[in-house]
Amino acid sequence: MPVDRLLAQHCRILTNVESVERFSEGPPPPQNDNMADKRWAFTRDLLVHFARMESTIYGPMMSDRREHAQKAAARGSVETAALMAEYREHVARWQGPHPADRWETYRRGVTRLMQRIRARLEAEAMEIVPLLPVQPDGTRRAGPTRESYVAEAWEIRGVLFEGTKLPL
């Protein structure tokens, strides 16, 4: 993935993060306010970005000829997977409308999650971008990692639009 495209994705996601933060700083939305489209757009952008990172950067970089690049890619992949597990937990916990009586708890959870997303994007920019382009070591083992996040995206979409439940 070209660096300029990667950084453009970071900018779009950070703009979305800022929107989520502004939303959570305000009062609870009305009970009839359906946020599914906005929540799905945010989730889709985030998961597509992380899926691309896994398939076009982390996977190939794990076979980079530079050992420090291999380690950075492996660490980035593990940290992304941990963040996505936290994201999934958040979605499972906050399915449906956000009741006013739990708004402060929701707000704290959103704030924490948005900080983690910011930190992950900053780590990509500081630890991975300087190592691009990938410098393959010539082995054929380079390729996508086991993480794709496609199944996660469809599960979350089902929660938002179809009312299916994610296990906690």
Image (cartoon, helix red, strand yellow):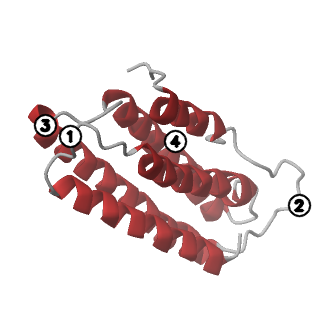
Amino acid type of disc 1?
Answer: Tyr
Task: Give the CA distance from mark 4 to mark 3.
Answer: 31 Å
**Dot 3 corresponds to which residue?**
100
Q: Residue at x 35, y 36 (%)?
A: 90
Q: Nearer the viewer, residue 93 or 5?
A: 93
Asked if residue 45 is positioned above or below residue 124 in the image, the reply reads above
Q: Earlier in the sequence, mark 4 or mark 3?
A: 4
Q: Are marks 3 and 2 in contact (CB under 8 Å)?
A: no
Q: Which mark is residue 138?
A: 2
Residue lying furthest front in this view? Answer: 32
Asked if residue 148 is positioned above or below residue 164 in the image, the reply reads below
Asked if residue 119 is positioned above or below residue 165 in the image, the reply reads below
Classify mark 2: residues with Cα within 10 Å, few (<14), some (14-19) or many (20+).
Answer: few
**Dot 4 corresponds to which residue?**
81
Amino acid type of disc 2?
Answer: Gly
Classify mark 4: residues with Cα within 10 Å, few (<14), some (14-19) or many (20+).
Answer: some
Q: Earlier in the sequence, mark 1 or mark 3?
A: 3
Q: Nearer the viewer, residue 99 or 71?
A: 99
Residue lying furthest bottom in this view? Answer: 4
In front: mark 1 or mark 3?
3
Q: Answer with the quarter of the image where residue 136 lies.
A: bottom right
Q: Residue at x 47, y 41 (%)?
A: 84
Q: Answer with the quarter of the image where residue 152 lies.
A: top right
SS class of the residue under badge 1? helix
Q: Nearer the viewer, residue 114 or 134?
A: 114
Task: Give the CA distance from mark 1 to mark 3.
Answer: 9 Å
